[in-house]
Amino acid sequence: MRLVGGALAAMAVLSGCAQDTAIRPDLSVILADRPAETLRAYGLFKDQQAEQPADGVVAYDLINPLFSDHAEKDRYVFVPMGETATYQPDEVFEFPVGSVLIKSFSYEETGTIETRLLIHKSKGWVAYPYVWNAERTDAHYAPIGAKQSLDIVEPGTGDAITIAYSVPNQNQCKTCHQAGDALTPIGPKARNLDHIGPNGRFQVADWTERGVLSGAPQDISAVPAIEDAAADIALRARAYLDINCAHCHKDEGSASNSGLWLEWTEEEPVRLGVGKHPTAAGRGAGDLELVVVPGEPDASILVHRMASTEAGVAMPELGRTVVHEDGVELVQAWIADLDKD
């Protein structure tokens, strides 16, 4: 990690003892052939509850997080000392071997439920899910996933609801993180990161100064926050679809056979569903004919599937059991605003 100003001096003063006592990620565990049995073994956090990252682990967030049944998410990145991720303008940054992307899911009523690790091994990325025990003192490796019934208060409405929460198994991780025959991260792209993050700075610049990232330009085009009412409705809807749907609905994604490609960089209207007939929707089409009908959200298959919780109809297929009303309303508003001609 690159140190500047007073931080360099502080490291020099503390070097006699801090190097012996500081908790840092353990590369021997990170790069081992088999996953560790507990999250604690990786040394990614200073405390048992995984609330304080270890030295070299950096907290970050996304401008628009993927909706997962109202779960709160805490994200962290680790890049081995002396290495950097390489900037990519439109795709996920290229992370060196030994890098770890960490994401914990929690609710105010329950505390942390699970922590997912994406680790860049020598043969590519692997996904390891860890489920927290009832005392929230450690998380254990759960390759078959887990299911929990959670009673929460729904944000926005204040209603008491029950969530059928599902921790994905390793095969399900591949559904969203698939890129051809390999796994890949989803969130850490410049357009999703370039805003003021949990460390109080614009994240791309912050990562660069910390030595986590190299090659980033000064000017970066970020997506708008979906809740920013001052931003263009079409851009906000596209940003929502990009983070919630495009990891599958892209050329190399698991839904590439649908012909519906929802990445932020897509410019072809038909590929975005406008005036497009479904190719593999089955009963999910709900007797509707087109994915997006300009000016008519209620006649659009895209809205129909987003507003459903029925298995085989609901989209996204994984990660939610309730409807994200704000997301549905945003996409409805975008479609209503499209020119019918």
Image (cartoon, helix red, strand yellow):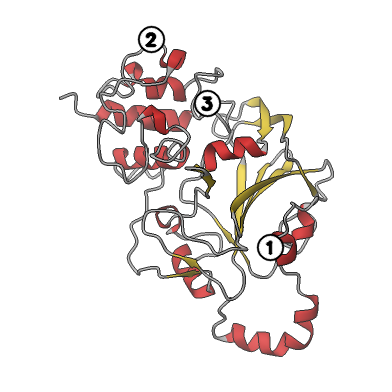
Residue 26 visible? The answer is no
Res 268 → quadrant: top left
Q: Percent position (x, y) of residue 152?
A: 68, 31
Reply above or below: 272 against 294. Answer: below
**Chain-order first, disc 3 or disc 2:** 2
User: How many numbered dots are placed on residues in this image?
Assistant: 3
Q: Mark 2 points at which residue?
A: 287
Q: Please, what is the three-letter code of the amino acid marked with disc 2?
A: Asp
Nearest the camera: 145 or 46?
145
Res 252 → quadrant: top left
- Classify mark 1: residues with Cα within 10 Å, few (<14), some (14-19) or many (20+): many
Residue lying at 74% horizontally and 30% vertically, measured from the top left: 148
Q: Percent position (x, y) of residue 98?
A: 62, 63
Which numbered disc covers residue 25? Answer: none
Task: Name the secondary structure under disc 1.
Answer: loop
Residue lying at 35% horizontally and 39% vertically, measured from the top left: 238
Question: Contact (CB < 8 A) between labels 3 and 2?
Answer: no
Task: Name the secondary structure under disc 3.
Answer: loop
Task: Name the secondary structure under disc 2.
Answer: loop
Does residue 28 appear left or right of residue 251 in this picture?
right
Residue lying at 78% horizontally and 57% vertically, measured from the top left: 40
**Chain-order first, disc 1 or disc 2:** 1
Q: Please, what is the three-letter code of the amino acid marked with disc 1?
A: Pro
Q: Nearer the viewer, mark 1 or mark 2?
A: 2
Does residue 63 appear left or right of residue 299 in this picture?
right
- Classify mark 2: residues with Cα within 10 Å, few (<14), some (14-19) or many (20+): few
Q: Name the residue under label 1.
A: 53
